[in-house]
């Protein structure tokens, strides 16, 4: 009986369930001899279970398990007068589920619960399902991300070889426990609910691609706006895809979401390439604005070189004049320096020169 089917963790490839596991077998050693119709059923818990023989079964794909119970474990053993034993255990188990995520999130998963004999091979113990309703599921069972479509049961034998070299897909190596062991399998077929992914991934990604196409209607010269719009949509879409991929394991094959990611990224990247291509063409074909041609403009352009020459000649004349003035000033300075020179002669030459007439005659004695 399945009480609860918990979250299926795609990242760890496992799921959790709470079940009531019941075994039924008949032990002739427990038959009550000369029993009458009023003989009562013997019931007990772990103490009674420890005094009788019980089959040792284990979960092949078990990750973690524990017997539930508050205070005491939920174990019940009942023995009928004819030696029939019913063993009931309420358990919480975490099981391995190998998922195929190629069609994610439009995928269906089949997660098994495999029960197998541990120490007794098929010559000593045979396992089988009850003919009438071998597995029952809680009618109020509700899953968050999946819906339970169907439950399958199967009975098979697991083969284990003595030699490791003989191991194959259907023949496993088991060392000293070689042989055939009876196996019971219950498979839960689960269908993923895609509403969450459509609203949180596919619809936003479509809107982002449409927003990236807005650049087609913008002016080719609007470089900042078109660049910002293209890069922002690209980064937003990459962030959105990473949030979806973070909950999935890294697998070797390509998933459906990755194909969608490649297509959307191609559209957004194409809008950026289109912008660059159009901008280059626009710059090459850009028209240079010229003044309106008129007779006035032609006359002005014709006379402008002559006026420039005259201005250049006048400026050169002024420069020559300034240079000649500087030269004259320099010559004047030199002349003034020549006139201000002091001549030094010898004392004898000074005495030999006659003195100028001063209006009086010298005496002969002098």
Image: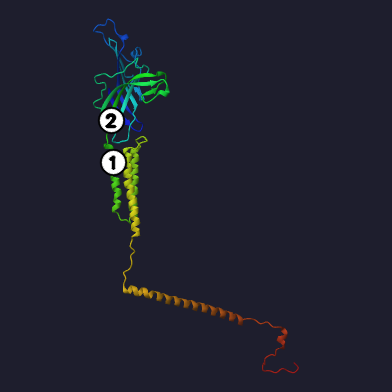
What residue did someone put label 1 on?
202
**Quarter of the figure that contains the N terminus:** top left
- Is 280 placed above or below 40 here? below
User: Element at badge 2?
Assistant: strand
Which residue shows up at 28% across the image and 37% down it?
196
The x and y percentages for residue 194 are: 27, 36
Q: Closest to the observer: 13 or 363?
A: 13
Q: Closest to the observer: 259 or 233?
A: 259
What residue did someone put label 2 on?
190
Q: Identify the image's colour scheme: rainbow, by chain, secondary structure or one colour.
A: rainbow
Characterize the local packing of mark 2: few (<14), some (14-19) or many (20 or more) Cα atoms within 10 angstroms.
Answer: many
The x and y percentages for residue 202 are: 28, 41
Characterize the local packing of mark 1: few (<14), some (14-19) or many (20 or more) Cα atoms within 10 angstroms.
Answer: some
Contact, mark 2 vs mark 1 (Cβ under 8 Å) = no
- Is 190 placed above or below 265 here? above
Of all residues, the one furthest to the right in this rendering is: 365
Q: Quadrant of residue 259?
A: top left
Of all residues, the one furthest to the front in this rendering is: 166
User: Element at badge 1?
Assistant: helix
Of all residues, the one furthest to the top in this rendering is: 34
**Quarter of the figure that contains the C terminus:** bottom right
Of the residues under marks 2 and 1, which one precedes in the sequence? Answer: 2
Which residue shows up at 54% across the image and 78% down it?
327
Q: Quadrant of residue 129?
A: top left
The x and y percentages for residue 57 are: 35, 19
The count of marks equals 2
Q: Closest to the observer: 323 or 181?
A: 181
Disc 2 versus disc 1: distance between alpha carbons?
Answer: 22 Å
- Is 351 placed above or below 54 here? below
Mark sitting on residue 360? none
The x and y percentages for residue 75 are: 32, 18
């Amino acid at each position: 009986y399945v009480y609860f089917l918990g979250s299926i963790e795609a990242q760890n490839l496992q799921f959790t369930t709470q079940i009531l596991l019941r075994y039924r077998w008949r032990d002739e050693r427990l038959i009550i001899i000369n029993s009458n119709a009023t003989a009562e059923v013997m019931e007990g818990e772990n103490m009674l279970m420890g005094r009788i023989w019980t089959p040792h079964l284990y979960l092949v794909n078990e990750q973690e398990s524990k017997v539930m119970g508050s205070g005491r474990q939920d174990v019940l053993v009942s023995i009928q007068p004819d030696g029939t034993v019913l063993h009931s255990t309420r358990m919480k188990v975490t099981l391995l589920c190998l998922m195929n995520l190629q069609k994610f999130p439009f995928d269906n998963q089949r997660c098994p619960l495999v029960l197998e004999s541990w120490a007794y091979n098929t010559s000593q113990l045979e396992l089988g399902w009850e003919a009438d309703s071998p597995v029952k599921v809680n009618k109020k069972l509700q899953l968050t991300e999946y819906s339970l479509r169907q439950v399958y049961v199967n009975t098979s034998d697991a083969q284990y070889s003595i030699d490791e070299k003989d191991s194959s897909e259907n023949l496993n190596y088991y060392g000293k426990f070689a042989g055939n062991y009876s196996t019971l399998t219950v498979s839960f077929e689960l269908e993923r609910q895609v509403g969450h992914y459509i609203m949180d991934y596919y619809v936003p990604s479509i809107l982002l691609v449409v927003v990236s196409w807005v650049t087609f209607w913008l002016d080719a010269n609007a470089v900042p706006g078109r660049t910002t719009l293209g890069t922002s949509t690209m980064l937003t879409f990459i962030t959105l895809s990473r949030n979806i991929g973070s909950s999935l394991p890294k697998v070797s094959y390509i998933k459906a979401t990755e194909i969608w990611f490649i297509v959307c990224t191609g559209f957004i990247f194409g809008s950026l390439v289109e912008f660059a291509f159009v901008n280059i063409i626009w710059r090459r074909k850009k028209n240079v604005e010229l003044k309106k041609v008129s007779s006035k403009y032609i006359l002005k352009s014709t006379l402008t070189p002559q006026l420039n020459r005259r201005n250049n000649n006048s400026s050169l004349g002024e420069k020559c004049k300034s240079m000649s003035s500087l030269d004259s000033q320099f010559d004047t300075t030199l002349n003034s320096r020549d006139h201000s020179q002091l001549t030094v002669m010898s004392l004898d030459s000074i005495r030999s020169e006659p003195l100028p007439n001063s209006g009086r005659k010298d005496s002969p004695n002098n």
